[in-house]
Structures are given as structure tokens and as C-alpha cells.
Amino acid sequence: MDQQVVRRASVAVFVVFFANGWVFASWAARLPAVRDGLGLRPDQMGLLLLVAALGALVALPVSGLIVERVGVHRAIGGAAALYAVSMVAVAVGVQLGAAWLVVPALPFLGMAMGLWDAAMNLEGAVVEQRLGRTTMPRYHAGFSLGTVVAAGVAAVVAWLHVPLVAHLPVAVGLGLFAVVVALRLFLPESEPRFAARHECPAGVRRSSFTAWAEPRTVLIGLGVLGVALAEGAANDWLSLAVVDGLGTSHALGAVGFGLFVAAMTAVRFGGTALIDRLGRVTVLRAGALVALAGLGLFGLAGPVWLALVGAAAWGAGVALGFPVGMSAAADDPFRAPGRVAVVSTIGYTAFLAGPPVLGFLAQHVGYRHALLAVTVPVLLGMLLSGATAPLRARGTEQPATLEHASGTGARS
């Protein structure tokens, strides 16, 4: 295939990741305003976020099947449109103080988030394979860059006391426009993303659901679950923890969230070279240690500035977990749709369990100390990082070599 077409598609995938991060962080950075607008306690906020997570978990298990049936273009475009409509409904509900309007909209927001996430990761893995070099961390850096920009905008609009009903519709409208433009530069729909049925090696079943029985895929998913809990906890609670736990303003809460995602962005941009040089496993284990140190600082440090340094280290440490998990799930192009769907589904259970558990803890010990519980899933991700070692050969079920399993000399 013409490499110029592939390179344009790579830029387009980056834009779609950026738009996803922009839309998501426009919501996440304004959670204190959502809390205040609806008058919710910490445990009630946890349940509210759980409702959105349930929607994502409905969409994710079938995301691979949806992409195979309708194509990547329609899957991402439809998900982005649903995301925009749901976000506008949430903003209007918060403005009216009407939980009865917000709650029914959140499952659809979660469904859109889950399908968009899985579909763009699948397309990113395909383009990465066409390019023949590590690019997935940079796509996720696009997501993080979107969150950084959105968090900065959110900090300004919060400082100016701009209501959600004015902020969120504009934010999601811009994100949807970017997606529509980028989809025109994706790989053509006529270009096969995955191997045709008759090209599969003997004995390979291409059902999207058989990947649930594969130990390596499940272990990768559990490792991603640990990282997603750490990342999702920051998305859901960090701005609130800065505001309430450190006694600061809503604007500084958005700044704290911005530091977290800025650190993630920087590491994801530089992570491709680290992974190619050191291997997936070594990089993931080192990142887990940095995240643990950052969580300790954020949860226990006295001065505000030191806690914010901890937030940045936390973001840097968990930055590469999700993109590496997606690349590992897509190592074999014959099974990529089902495996990416499985890993995404397991990872997103973090957003199902995390919000209510942390909300319950925050109700009793405060937001900052509750977030110290995130050290447990970070340790889980570190212990399971060996599962991401590359397969010995594409299209086989043979285990990784000892060199790859050690995380030395491996290419992602």
C-alpha cells in the first residue's frame, strides 16, 4: 500500500485520539461544577460516574464485532455523534439541577466513549502495523494532548465562572468537527484491516468472542485494568481531591488535573523510543514505580506544590500502560479485533468498580487519602506486565522468547 496514504492515516488517527481526549477532559475537568450543580456527596458522585461506566461496559464487549460489521469510519463517527448529544444533555441537566435528566444521558455517554475508544485503538494498531514501527504511544499522546488543552481551557472557563451549558456544547461540537474531518483521511474502507477468513492459519477461529479463552489476552487485560484504575481514578477524582483535599479553588483543581495529563502526554510522546530501546516489560515496570512514588506524594504531602508534583509523577508513571496493552493485544492481525475488544472490556471494568469504591472511601477518609488505594492496582499492573512481551511471530500462538519476556531488546 502507498506509504503516503498510510502516513496521512496515521496523522488522522492522532487527530481522532486528540479529539477523544479533548471531549473527555472537557467533562472530567469540570466534575467539581457537576458536583456543585447537582448538590452531590462524594459517594453519590461515585454512583453517578458508575452509571456512565455501565454504558461503556455494554458497548465494549461487542465493539470488535461492531467494527467488523459497520467499519471503523461509521463506528467512530457514530460514537462521536452520540457522545456529543449525550454531553449536551448532561450540561443542560446540570444547569437545571435536574439529576433526572443527567442520569439517563450518562449510559449513552459511556456507550459512545467505549465504542469510540475501542475503534480508534483498533485502527491505530492497524496503521502501526502498516507503518512497521511503534506508533501507538504517540496516538495515546494525542489523547493526552487533547486532555491537556481541554484542562487548560476548563481552568480558564472555571475561573471565569462560565456555566457547563455554555462550555460543554462548544467543546463537543469542536471535537465532533475534528473527527468528521479526520475520518476522510483514514485508510480507505476498501482497504482490509484484518486478514480475510481464507488467509487465516489452520485452526484459527476469528470469532470476536473466542479471545476470552486466551490466557495471554486475559492477563494483558488485567494488567491494563490496573493501569486504567490508576488513570481513571485521576480522571474522576483528581480535580475534586485538589479542590477539597487541599482546600483550593476550582481553577487550581483543573490545573492539578492538567499537570497529571501533561505528564502523561510528555511520556507518551517520548515512550516510543523507550519501548523500542528497552522493551515493553521493562518500561511498564519502571513506570509503575514512578506512579507509586507519585501517588504517595499526592496522598500524603503537606504543601500544595509537592502534592501537585506527585500528581505529575503519577501521570508519567501510568502513561504507557494502556497503549502498550493495546499494541500487545493486536500483535496478531488475525485476532486483533476480538483481542482488542477483550482487553478494552477488562480495562474498562476499572471505571465500573473504581468510582463507587473510591467515592465510598472518600466519604470516610477524604479524597486524597482515598486515592492512596490506587497503589494496589498499580502493583497489579506491574506484576502482570510480562504478558505484554511480543509474540515470537505474528500469526502464531507461540510464546515470546526469553529475551522478549525479560523486556530486553523487544520491539513493540
Image (cartoon, grey):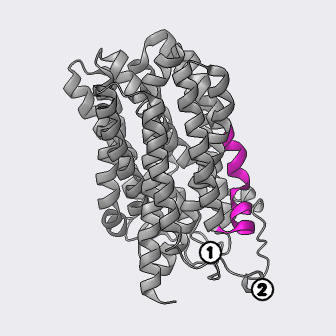
**As shown in the figure, which amino acid type bears the numbered disc 1?**
Pro
For the residue pair 5 and 316, the one nearer the viewer reads as 5
Q: In percent of the image, x 33 and y 32: which residue is there?
A: 157
Residue lying farthest top? 364
Q: Which residue is mark 1?
A: 333
Judge whether residue 390 can be spotted in this image.
Answer: no
Q: In percent of the image, x 65 and y 34: which residue is there?
A: 105
Q: Which mark identifies residue 140?
A: none
Please give the count of numbered marks on the rendered protein.
Answer: 2
Element at label 2: helix
Judge whether residue 396 can be spotted in this image.
Answer: yes
Does residue 8 appear to the left or right of 221 in the view shown?
left
Q: Please state the extent of the stretch shown in magenta in the rendering.
A: 54-71
Q: Which residue is mark 2?
A: 198
Q: Quadrant of residue 406?
A: bottom left
**As shown in the figure, which amino acid type bears the numbered disc 2?**
His
Q: Main secondary structure of the magenta part?
A: helix
